[in-house]
Amino acid sequence: MEVEAAEAGAVEKERGRLAGLSSGASLSPPVVAGLIVASIAVALIVTQGLQPFGQTTVNGLISASYFALGAVGLTLVYGTLKLVNFAHGDLLTLGAYVAFVANVSLGLPILLAVLCSVAVVAAFGVATERVMWRPMRAKGAGLLQLLIMTLGLAFVIRYSIQLFAGTQPRSLEVDVTSSTSFVGLTIGQTQLIVVLAGFAVLLAVGAALRFTSLGKQMRALSDNFELAEVAGINTDRVVLATWIFAAGLAGLAGVLYTSAIGNMTPNLGFFLLLSLFAAVILGGIGNAYGALAGGVLLGLTQEWSTLLVDARWKLAVGFLVLILVLVVRPQGLFGRQERAL
């Protein structure tokens, strides 16, 4: 009996060891997604050529810069307040038009116009928190009521802009004709600035969320709002900071989009909103780092698809990628059970 017990114990130990090896050998979903993307990139290089692939990658990074900025702001609000903000796209529009007023109407340099845009849209986000969202939370409003309010706010912003600015396309005073070439690839000088500025801001936001006290408090609110309040965190201050970050990033994304594309209309944010939600869901709802990855992945796949299909279908290809990812992993690439930010 003792021998049999020892053998059984040895068998169980070996099973545990093999299970541990199997668990350790498994790759995380982001790593698997990265390997798949790398494989697709290699296949496109082999079949389409290095130069066309490189050019579409540059174009994809341009799109990714404003996709990721807008998506990070959208997911910050959801991660902290569980608010699905359908007005977020129109905050991008507001940012673009504030920059237009500052740059074109008032004649300010584009850098000052960008700062004005970020400041005004951030202040608008704080105002909506004070006037709309905080009173509704205090009254225990449900998801449906808040959702309808965000839709209403989106229409108010959009048609207010249309009332004062009209429907004709507008442009900022930026150089949209000059370009820079390197290793056979071409990018507009303004677009290069857009990419560098966008990713620099994203890295700064990521570092702030990870290492600063405010970032840690925002993540604590994302985990459990009530528990964070009981633990002594000033939740009102953190919520206001969240709106400043989210709305400010939205304003910046609107200016970068307009600078990269060359013009704006009051429907700018409406057309971008679905792509922003796609980036958020692709990375994992409420996860700021996932939104960054989702924005980059969405921008690259849409532009890479133009090597195989007509450019008119690239938006559909982006959503096809979203569907495929969610079929395999419904919580998104970076989705987690315990932490939403």
Image (cartoon, rainbow, N blue to C red):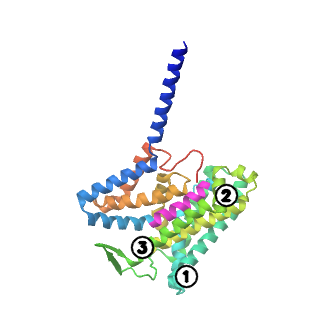
Which residue in the protein does label 2 denote?
Answer: 217
- Secondary structure mostly taken by the magenta-highlighted segment of the chain: helix
Type of residue at label 1?
Leu
Give percent across and percent down for residue 21. Answer: 46, 37
Residue 267 seen in the current view: no
Q: Quick one: label 2, few (<14), some, or many (20+) residues within 10 Å?
A: many
Magenta region, residue range:
65-79
Q: Are marks 1 and 2 in contact (CB under 8 Å)?
A: no
Find the distance from the CA under tag 1 to the CA under tag 3: 18 Å
Residue at image point 59% right, 71% down: 121
Which residue in the protein does label 1 denote?
Answer: 112
- Using the image, determine if residue 260 lies above or below residue 292: below
Asked which quadrant contains residue 128, the reply is bottom right
Residue at image point 44% right, 41% down: 25
Give percent across and percent down for residue 325. Answer: 42, 47
Q: Quick one: label 3, few (<14), some, or many (20+) residues within 10 Å?
A: many
